[in-house]
Image (spheres, rainbow, N blue to C red):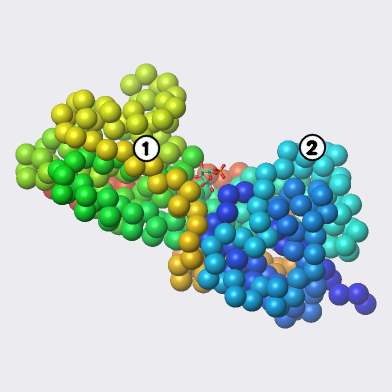
Amino acid sequence: MNKRRIGVLTSGGDASGMNAAIRTIVRTAIHYGMEPYGIFRGYHGLVHNEIEPLNSRSVSGIIQRGGTILKSARSEEFMTPEGRKKAVENLKKHGIDALVVIGGDGSFRGGLELQKLGCDVIGVPATIDNDIACTDYSIGFDTAVNTVTDAINKIRDTASSHDRVYVVEVMGRHSGYIALYSGLASGADAILVPEVPFNLDKVCNQIIDANKKGKTHSIIVAAEGVGVDPENNTKIESHSMYIGNYIQQKTGYETRITILGHIQRGGAPTVRDRCLASRLAYHAVELIYQGESGKMIGEVDKVIKSWDLEYALAQKKQFNLEYYHLSNILSSI
Ligand code: F6P
């Protein structure tokens, strides 16, 4: 009997720890007697037949590297029925009938489409945004949060030397998770996220009050998803600029804005991300070995579980309000 062939791709924004997941998928597949194939540039590569066999040596020396050796890309073509037809034909050409998709919710939606066309798909959550339901953490989030926290530590040094207010914009188009964890971990004075409505005047009063109590610098962490002016509900193009200017005008304190950008997506993955990636990826291959399909793997309360992919995609990730309130209490004293 021919060995079962299993494909792996990374899709969407890259996240540190994706390489650790790829390494585990390849080696676990071999462990279970399957043949692993790498699909390069996500769904784009699937449509364009960028598919190659991988072996244990192809994934040597990558566990500590950020990014993804399989690369990632956006694919308009895969969004069309013709594009997906080509993708399935390419999988068939290589004899691949199972696929591990490493990525975020957009990538999982793509996986679901392939599932409907007869390919066994398992999703492994990887995005720095940590906005996927049915898992407490996604691969890459911990590394991003550590990078941001390290950057804020440095910003705090200069903020305190110059008695300034800093607005630090972090990633998270629709998610405040990076802002939340890095804000709590770096002792931010306010955390502005899309999940919780806020009032900029209140934030300004908080900064003024803190100043009266002897605190001469402040750090405000704002998620990039905070793109709506709460006063008139209009979209603000560069919201951290708007927030910074607003604070400076209202408080009279010198204010600077730092947009951390794509630095948050790179760098060596933390131990937490390497371990999470290895565990999630191992279980993904195990599911394929057991003949399962249409599932995503997640870690909930430190236990690895699998969920129906369609169900998981329909859930909304709960925001951690406990962290949010704790940060507010600590910054208001
Ligand atoms: O990976 C998720 C994310 O980092 C978002 O927070 C951000 O808005 C987006 O990717 C930006 O990605 P790109 O610049 O690659 O389009």
Q: Which mark is residue 326?
A: none
Say whether marks 1 and 2 touch (CB < 8 Å). Answer: no
Tell me: 193 left or right of 48: left
Q: Residues within 10 Å of mark 2 (few under 14, many from 20)?
A: few
Residue 12 showing in the rendered view: yes
Residue in the image at 42% along x and 49% along y = 177
Read off the residue under disc 1: 196
Left or right placement of residue 204 versus residue 107 in this view:
left
Closer to the N terminus: mark 1 or mark 2? Answer: 2
Label 1, residues with CA under 10 Å away: few <14, some 14-19, many ≥20: few
User: Is residue 150 shown above or below 1?
Assistant: above
Q: Relative to 251, does residue 274 appear above or below in the rendering?
A: below
Q: Of residues 326 and 125, which is closer to you in this image?
A: 125
Work out which residue is located at the far top of the displayed protein and give it.
Answer: 232
Q: Residue at x 89, y 58 (%)?
A: 92
Q: Answer whether residue 120 is visible to the viewer in this image.
A: no
Residue at the spot x=73%, y=38% of the render?
A: 76
* Amino acid type of the residue tagged 1 in the rendering: Val
- Residue depth check, mark 1 versus mark 2: number of the one nearer the observer: 2
Mark 2 Cβ and ligand 1 under 8 Å apart: no
Q: Position of residue 281 (x, y in %)?
A: 63, 68
Q: Position of residue 289 (x, y in %)?
A: 75, 72
Q: Secondary structure at mark 1?
A: loop
Residue at image x 46%, y 71%?
271
* Residue 186 on image: x %, y %: 28, 55
* Residue 10 horizontal side relative to residue 170, left or right: right
- Give 162 or 330, whichever is nearer the viewer: 162
Residue 45 pos. (x, y %): 76, 52
Residue at mark 2: 80
Callout 2: SS: loop
